[in-house]
Image (cartoon, grey):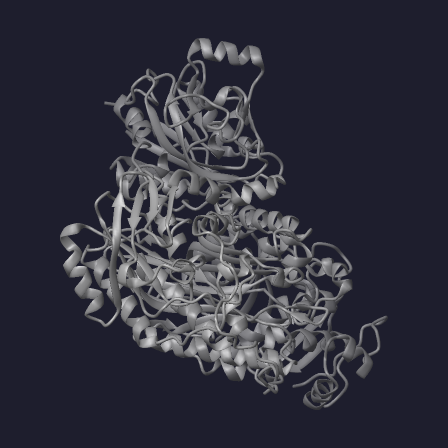
């Protein structure tokens, strides 16, 4: 599988994403520059975490107008796989490639910690290596991760299985305490209706080595890589 | 040749009175007139006032700092550049430094702390090193002081707001609350970067005729006289100094990091320095003077944020995220292309000259023309009088007061903001970006792996102002010992030190005495560990209305381990493991958190045997290297009892411990809550007991088996101290202490 990691000027986890895919997974991965329009023939585009263009206005609000995002939108429309992590998720929402929006955490402060997530739909290209209902331990690190969408849209998303990941406690139960940022319905990750675009606030690329706190993030990357076989 | 600069119409008159208003002493002003052979222009007076400020010139500290050891076979760069560097193996050098941003953070906590992070990052990447880890040391007033919450929230928000946006993990730190800092908080920021040995960049200019490029944010009026603000005491009018605090733009900083590192790889950069304190003035004069050259700047080329800035303002602005670069002549375009790629502009604003003068032009006229040495080597140098305070703290015999019940004392200590979990703070920092953080905040020292290598580095920042207040020499020694011991507990050998020396007004003989004794303590401990001091910073004038802070040397230690898989954490690992206590001396309640909380006279500090301290560090490192130590935790604030509790708080699974001191003490308050001496709590697999004992006891260190790790999550300490506490409950107290206070609960 050929992967492309988009590098915006304020991307921060671009190197970590490339490292996880190329060094840890041994996959074919390359950086894509935000000023370019070419995706270089990749089969999965990853929009990494960070602050794209500084995000002083609104997270992801400027990034959606970058040259590369025109190509990413077309790539997604053609059915290509797009994975947005953290700031990448925010950009995908701003670009209307995913429903909903991400706003400031309930605590109004940045949160960096490991959380538990429950896989709500294990039949997508991004989660097929996990079991339905499986718990994953992944880190989050964001100031604006509170997921919101209109109530009727949320209902439809749930019916179609677009809610992919939810924040839960270590026992797999939803609770207010286990919801780190106050997201509606404890939503941590969603897909589009065609299930070829997936955004999540947790960082799977930071959970790929035992020494650095766990390997649950591999489930996401293995799901994507496995689909190409 | 020297040109007579043109005064600018409308500028204030320069006379001794004006010089005094700029913070220059009458002698200093006379010296300026002498060096110039004439009266300075107003612009020149401003330039002298910042370059000769304590902050820029180190005029009170320089002669004492020379005592610090700065050499070893691992030192790649000692003091004299933007940061020091140590060889950490496999072709890598670690470039690191700690710096204060105390005064701005007290005036405007968010921006003050944010720009402190930004400034120290620039010191690292100007050396060609990619910043890979940040730490910070914070001192606030007492939690009950009305301003503390505002300052805490602002400073932590600022460190996170900046650090989280530039992609450098904040991996460790320390936070202390004490009424002694009510009116003078301390914000010390540390950064470490990695660079391939031989690819380091320098701030030393070469080659007359080489162009000088300005890169980064445009120059505005912010931060004018920031360096001067940091060189004076606070008073009731300090609020009015808010405009002297700069505003940070972390996105531009991130672009600068990437662009400068990429530009460095072209080989077209001769010298590079950030425009920090005293901005364009200090960066240009320092680069040129380090190379024995002169420099000529055309201020009309400087990118400005707004029209109408005077040369005085342009030269003294401390606007953030600006770099000054000397390029190889003819290769300007190559560098400019790199900066354009990152949407930054590199503008030629001057050139190096051979005439050793610092000359600036504006609207075609020379507005300042100063022999460059006058801004550097000829700056004033003082040997300020030093005297021990007349009234020494009374040397009372220890403890006659009534002590609380041990269980009650332990709970109170775990609830103290100085001991309690700082998770509320570090949860707001990205501690994992760059995928190197093996141990992040919340253990004794941070551990970072080096990619494509088995090696790792360990980092710890420490200070001990209460001990320094009792004895500034012993306090400094104890601080270095503690930081070195923490790094060794993680399994790393201490190899280098950086320091931030925070003191009061050096014009007071007793403060100068504290400072000199602190430097001597730092020197002696540094020699004992073979860990040289490669960089540092001095922050004087930390006092308000005549009340100085306690002497606070903040020490950061870099450790190296050969095999990252051998790293050790502070948490007990498995039921049945033996718990051992290792000490270099008997503990005491002097300068302890216990004495502070229960208002007990802790007495005087005991002597420190540096040879034993070094032996302890050596034994810890060897034990870790041989894989014999399951956990190692330094007993710091709160002593042995708190260390035992913290070792039980394993985030994976809470464990318990059963402990009886036996011959290691009669189980009084001093045994369990005393500090002072170096005490480490180890856990060891049963089969390794003998080998570990000979490792420590063989070096003449006190080694005692005091108990066992238990699956039952209770901390049991045998009579006569007698306590039996639920570890989960202790952890709840420990974790909720700071959030509870912030919620406004009791």
- Horizontal arrangement in the rendering, residue B93 relative to residue B251 (left or right): left
Residue B140 in the image, given as x and y percentages of width and height: 59, 57
Q: Front-most of B735 and B312? A: B735
Residue A180 location in percent, x, y?
Answer: 49, 31
- Image quarter where the N terminus of chain B lies is bottom right
**Count of all numbered marks drawn on residues in the image:** 0
Mark yes or no: residue B91 visible.
no
Residue found 60% across the figure and 73% down from its top: B56
**Which residue is drawn at the image coordinates 24% and 65% (left, top)?**
B619
The quadrant of the picture occupied by the C terminus of chain B is top right
Compare residues B650 and B498 and report the one nearer the observer: B650
Q: Would residue B583 be visible to someone looking at this image?
A: yes
Q: Does residue B91 appear to the left or right of B549 in the view shown?
A: left
Point 73% across, 85% down: residue: B29
Whether residue A44 is situated above or below residue B700 in the rendered picture: above
- Picture quadrant of residue B706: bottom left
For the residue pair B35 and B68, the one nearer the viewer reads as B68
Residue B399 placement, left or right of B611 = right
Say above or below: B650 vs B36: above
Measuring from the top left, give residue B513's x and y in whole percent. Answer: 56, 81
Give percent across and percent down for residue A164. 41, 20
Q: Quadrant of residue B557?
A: bottom left
The residue furthest right is B10
């Amino acid at each position: 599988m050929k992967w492309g990691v988009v590098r915006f000027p304020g991307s921060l986890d671009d190197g970590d994403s490339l490292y996880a895919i190329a060094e840890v997974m041994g996959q074919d991965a390359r950086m894509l520059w935000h000023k370019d329009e070419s995706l270089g023939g990749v089969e999965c585009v990853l929009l990494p975490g960070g602050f794209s263009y500084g995000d002083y206005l609104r997270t992801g609000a400027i990034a959606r107008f970058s040259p590369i995002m025109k190509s990413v939108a077309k790539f997604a429309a053609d059915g290509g796989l797009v994975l947005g992590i953290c700031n990448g998720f925010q950009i995908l929402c701003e670009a209307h490639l995913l429903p909903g929006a991400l706003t400031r955490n309930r605590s109004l402060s940045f949160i960096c910690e490991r959380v538990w997530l429950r896989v709500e739909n294990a039949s997508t290209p991004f989660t097929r290596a996990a079991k339905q209902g499986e718990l994953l331990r992944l880190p989050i690190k964001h100031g604006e991760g509170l997921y919101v969408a209109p109530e009727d849209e949320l209902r439809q998303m749930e019916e179609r299985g677009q809610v992919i990941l939810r924040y839960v406690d270590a026992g797999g139960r939803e609770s207010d305490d286990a919801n780190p940022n106050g997201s509606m319905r404890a939503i941590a990750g969603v897909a589009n209706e065609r299930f070829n675009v997936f955004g999540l606030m947790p960082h799977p690329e930071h959970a790929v080595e035992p020494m650095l706190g766990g390997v649950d993030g591999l489930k996401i990357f293995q799901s994507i890589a496995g689909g190409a076989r | 040749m020297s040109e007579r600069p043109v005064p600018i119409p409308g500028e204030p008159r320069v006379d001794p009175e004006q010089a005094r208003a700029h913070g220059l002493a009458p002698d200093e002003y006379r010296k300026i007139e002498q060096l110039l052979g004439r009266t300075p222009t107003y612009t020149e007076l401003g330039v002298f006032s910042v370059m000769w400020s304590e902050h820029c010139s180190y005029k009170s500290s320089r002669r004492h700092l020379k005592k610090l050891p700065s050499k070893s076979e691992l030192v790649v760069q000692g003091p004299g550049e933007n940061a020091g560097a140590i060889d950490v193996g496999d072709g890598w050098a670690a470039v690191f430094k700690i710096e204060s941003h105390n005064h701005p953070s007290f005036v405007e906590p968010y921006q003050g702390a944010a720009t402190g992070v930004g400034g120290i990052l620039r010191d690292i990447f100007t050396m060609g090193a990619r910043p890979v880890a940040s730490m910070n040391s914070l001192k606030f007033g007492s939690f009950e002081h009305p301003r503390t919450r505002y300052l805490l929230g602002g400073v932590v928000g600022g460190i996170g707001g900046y650090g989280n946006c530039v992609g450098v993990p904040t991996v460790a730190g320390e936070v202390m609350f004490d009424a002694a800092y009510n009116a003078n908080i301390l914000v010390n920021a540390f950064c470490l970067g990695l660079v391939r040995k031989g690819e380091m960049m320098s701030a030393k200019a070469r080659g007359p005729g080489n162009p000088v490029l300005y890169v980064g944010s445009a120059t505005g009026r912010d931060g004018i006289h920031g360096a001067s603000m940091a060189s004076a005491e606070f008073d009731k009018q300090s609020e009015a100094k808010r405009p002297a605090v700069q505003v940070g733009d972390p996105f531009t900083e991130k672009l600068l990091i990437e662009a400068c590192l990429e530009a460095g790889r072209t080989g077209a950069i001769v010298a590079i320095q950030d425009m920090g304190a005293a901005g364009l003035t200090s960066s240009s004069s320092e680069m040129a003077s380090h190379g024995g050259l002169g420099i000529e700047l055309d201020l009309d080329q400087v990118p400005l944020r707004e029209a109408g800035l005077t040369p005085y303002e342009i030269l003294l602005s401390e606007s953030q995220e600006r770099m000054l670069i000397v390029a190889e002549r003819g290769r300007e375009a190559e560098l400019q292309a790199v900066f354009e790629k990152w949407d930054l502009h590199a503008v030629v604003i001057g050139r190096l000259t051979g005439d050793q003068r610092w000359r600036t032009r504006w609207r075609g006229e020379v507005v300042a023309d100063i022999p460059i040495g006058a801004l550097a080597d000829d700056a004033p140098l003082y040997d300020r009088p030093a005297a021990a305070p007349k009234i020494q703290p009374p040397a009372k015999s220890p403890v006659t007061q009534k002590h609380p019940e041990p269980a009650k004392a332990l709970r109170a200590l775990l609830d103290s903001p100085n001991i309690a979990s700082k998770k509320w703070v570090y949860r707001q920092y990205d501690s994992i970006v760059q995928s190197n953080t093996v141990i992040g905040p919340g253990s004794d020292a941070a551990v970072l792996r080096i990619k494509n290598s088995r090696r790792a580095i360990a980092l710890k920042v420490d200070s001990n102002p209460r001990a320094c207040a009792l004895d500034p020499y012993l306090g400094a020694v104890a601080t270095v010992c503690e930081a070195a011991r923490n790094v060794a507990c993680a399994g790393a050998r201490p190899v280098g030190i950086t320091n931030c020396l925070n003191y009061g007004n050096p014009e007071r003989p007793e403060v100068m005495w504290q400072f000199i004794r602190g430097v001597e303590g730092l020197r002696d401990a540094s020699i004992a560990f073979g860990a040289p001091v490669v960089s540092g910073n001095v922050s004087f004038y930390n006092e308000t209305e005549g009340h100085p802070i306690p002497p606070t040397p903040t020490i950061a230690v870099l450790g190296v381990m050969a095999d990252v898989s051998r790293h050790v954490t502070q948490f007990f690992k498995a039921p049945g493991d033996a718990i051992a206590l290792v000490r270099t001396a008997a503990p005491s309640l002097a300068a302890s958190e216990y004495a502070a909380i229960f208002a007990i006279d802790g007495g005087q500090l005991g002597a420190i045997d540096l040879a034993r301290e070094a032996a302890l560090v050596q034994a810890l490192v060897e034990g870790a290297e041989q894989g014999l130590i399951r956990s190692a935790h330094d007993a710091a604030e709160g002593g042995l009892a708190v260390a035992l509790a913290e070792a039980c708080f394993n985030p994976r699974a809470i464990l318990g411990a059963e402990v009886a001191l036996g011959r290691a003490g009669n189980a009084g308050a001093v045994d369990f809550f005393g500090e002072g001496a170096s005490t480490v709590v180890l856990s060891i697999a049963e089969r390794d007991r003998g080998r570990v004992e000979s490792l420590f006891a063989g070096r003449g260190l006190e080694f005692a088996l005091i108990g066992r790790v238990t699956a039952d999550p209770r901390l049991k300490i045998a009579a006569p101290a007698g306590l039996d506490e639920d570890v989960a409950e202790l952890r709840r107290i420990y974790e909720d202490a700071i959030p509870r206070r912030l919620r406004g609960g009791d």
